[in-house]
Image (cartoon, helix red, strand yellow):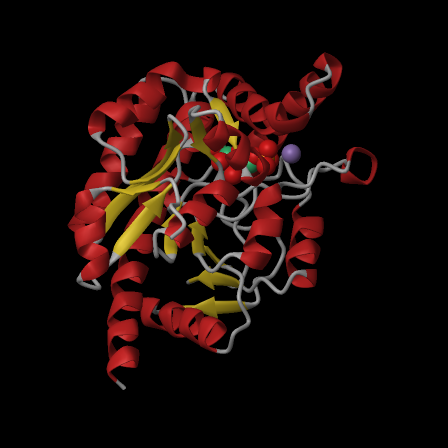
Amino acid sequence: MIHIPLDIAPEVADARSEHRPVLALESTIISHGMPYPENVETAYRVEEIARQEGAVPATIAILDGRLKAGLTPEEIDRLGQVGPKIAKASRRDIPILVASNENGATTVAATMIIAALAGIHVFATGGLGGVHRNASETFDISADLEELSRTEVAVICSGVKSILDIGLTCEYLETNGVPILGYKTSSLPAFYNRDSGFPVDRQIDEVAEVARIMMAQWTLGLGGGLIVANPIPEEMSMEKTVIDTAIEEALSEAEKKGVTGKEVTPFLLSKVAEITKGDSLKANIALVHNNVRLGARIAVSYSEISANNSRA
Ligand code: PSU
Ligand code: MN
């Protein structure tokens, strides 16, 4: 018997064994995506929102070399306080952290892997990594995209930030067979605002339709993940010129400072928050709340459909 170093929190394990809905949540957004204490407040709040909508939250991380599906409030607080000093863990980091009993905050990619190992197929977050703007020279393409092509998890997010090349990110996802569904929108949202100008593959107006597409993808053996893109609430969306100017400034600062590799995304996020005097952080928090609400509803709907399917 092979022992996987996976700890599923008791509440999550109970929900799984009773086929009740569970929603995965990531931890890089806590350690690297937002400053303290907003990061911890948001992490607690999203767990509450998931519960209100009828799903058990499972915040995912790597602690002392163990893959964790479900964290205690103390563990979340510690991740938030330690912040960017904890390793940002993507797929390639998992074996290293496990073998050396270390800690890691999981990105979208690593969260998908651990969620799938724990039998969780719905995951809500803020934004995805993608193809960076100058990727033709830097080759900077997030491992999140590759993960979406291989791991069976639906990721609810607010689309792709314009710190990235949105068009190339869509091309990459198309090549890898990852469906992009727009929740009540025909245009892929651009994170801080609602319209990137790029189309989604299908506008979906009902959560049950998302669940049916997930079921079709996986029962057909197509594998891989899907993206459910949920636009930021209208009243919180940012003026395009304001956010674009901030992003341009952050990008040129990153280039001047020679920021590369896994530091790029956290650097850009915090720089944009600084330039917009916290407005981008407020927008980020609002869209995460909104995505978790939708994600929990999708988890509820998917667990209903799976229950019907296994009875059939
Ligand atoms: N986008 C955000 N907030 C985040 C991230 C992206 O708005 O916290 C994090 C996620 O964990 C995502 C990761 O998986 O950054 C992507 O990093 P990279 O581009 O280095 O793959
Ligand atoms: Mn990268």
Within the displayed image, which quadrant is ligand 2 positioned in? top right
Relative to 179, say whether 57 is above or below: above
In this rendering, does residue 227 appear at all? yes
In the picture as drawn, the residue positioned furthest to the front comes out as 1
Q: Quadrant of residue 96?
A: top right
In the picture as drawn, the residue positioned furthest to the top comes out as 257
Image-based side of 180 in relation to 78, left or right:
right
Relative to 307, say whether 276 is above or below: above
Question: Which residue is located at x 64 percent, y 57 percent?
Answer: 173
Relative to 172, say whether 236 is above or below: above
Residue 11 image position (x, y, % from top left): 17, 46
Q: How many marks?
A: 0
Image-based side of 302 in relation to 130, left or right:
left
Residue 242 image position (x, y, % from top left): 56, 30
**Quadrant where the C terminus is found in the figure:** bottom left
Relative to 281, say whether 194 is above or below: below
In this rendering, does residue 54 appear at all? no
Residue 276 image position (x, y, % from top left): 50, 22
Along the line of sight, the residue nearer the viewer: 271 or 196: 271
Along the line of sight, the residue nearer the viewer: 6 or 151: 6
Question: Which residue is located at x 71 percent, y 36 percent?
Answer: 140
Residue 141 image position (x, y, % from top left): 68, 41
Image-based side of 307 in relation to 67, left or right:
left
Question: Which residue is located at x 51 percent, y 27 percent?
Answer: 88
Image-based side of 66 in relation to 221, left or right:
left
Q: Quadrant of residue 153?
A: bottom left
Q: Quadrant of residue 258?
A: top right
Question: Which residue is located at x 38 percent, y 28 percent?
Answer: 30
Along the line of sight, the residue nearer the viewer: 71 or 98: 98
In the picture as drawn, the residue positioned furthest to the right comes out as 137
